[in-house]
Amino acid sequence: MGRDVIVACDFKSKEDTFAFLDKFTGRKPFVKIGMELFYAEGPEIVREIKKRGHKIFLDLKLHDIPNTVKKAMSVLRNLDVDITNLHAAGTGAMMQAALEGLTREDGTHPLLIAVTQLTSTDQESMERDLLIEKPIDEVVMHYAETAKNAGLDGVVCSPLEAEKVHNRCGKAFLTVTPGVRFADGDVGDQKRVMTPAEAKKIGSDYIVVGRPITAAADPVAAYERCVKEFVD
Ligand code: C5P
């Protein structure tokens, strides 16, 4: 899998999701399924979207004791998703256990990536609520290194962090970056954003794009524009 645009299907139901995906006649975009849709529709939604020929990033951000995460990952393994994730804050032991659970009998596994610090966490809330007093950039890089040492394939990070992660963890360590907006588009609630072209320049491997595509007047044209800027 090379550089690609992942469309965040943040819909509340299967009907809304399929109404959206049906607009794409020629292309089969890489789709992100998050907690809302997964909890509403269950694992069947993954099977159905997969059957339609889409690649899937299942974004459930697991975080629990290693044994529980390992067992949960062995269930997700059977869904045959292409990418899934967890919180690096669960520690290296949890990430290693997760990878074991996700690994198939033939030794292959879906790409497993770690959330470092959520982009909704800032320096102040990290110090106040988590009692972590290091600079947030340093925390993100340390979590990325811990994920790499645990055998993970990459991290979810802000596009502004992607270059630093590659410098620290190597180019092969994947950076999956939300917070992407068109130069002439609405920023919405995302604070630190980049255009698809900028994300390409700094070396993001995958961009995750939601509302700039899902809420566009012409979602297919918006998707094509993303692909043109980021992939082509
Ligand atoms: O609509 P928008 O393009 O902001 O959607 C971005 C997607 O990426 C959403 O599904 C959001 O939950 C997800 N995400 C994010 N920031 C993170 C991790 C995930 O925006 N740090």
Image (tube, rainbow, N blue to C red):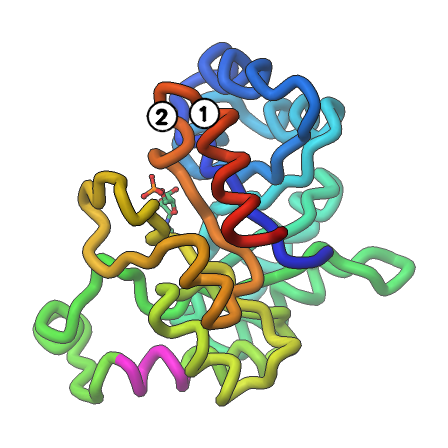
Name the side, left or right, on which 80 lies relative to 150: right
**Looking at the image, is 68 positioned above or below residue 40?**
below
Local packing at callout 2 (Cα closer than 10 Å; few below 14, some 14-19, many 20+) is some
Any mark on residue 194, and which?
none
For residue 227, side relative to residue 51 (left or right):
left
Q: CA distance from mark 1 to mark 2?
A: 5 Å
Q: Are marks 1 and 2 in contact (CB under 8 Å)?
A: yes
What kind of element bears circle 2? Answer: loop
What is the x, y in percent for residue 34? 45, 38
Any part of residue 64 in sight: no
Kindly state the secondary structure of the residue where label 1 is placed: helix
Q: Foreground: 229 or 188?
A: 229
Please tell me in which quadrant of the rendered image residue 68 appears.
bottom right
Q: Is-magenta flag for residue 138?
A: yes
Determine the residue positioned at 24% across, 79% down: 136
| Span shown in magenta | 137-142
Q: Residue at x 63, y 40 (%)?
A: 56
The residue labelled by disc 2 is: 216
Residue 102 against residue 92 in the figure, above or below: above
Q: Which of the pair 54/126 is nearer the observer?
A: 54
Percent coordinates x, y for residue 88 in the rendering: 44, 70
Give the residue at mark 1.
219
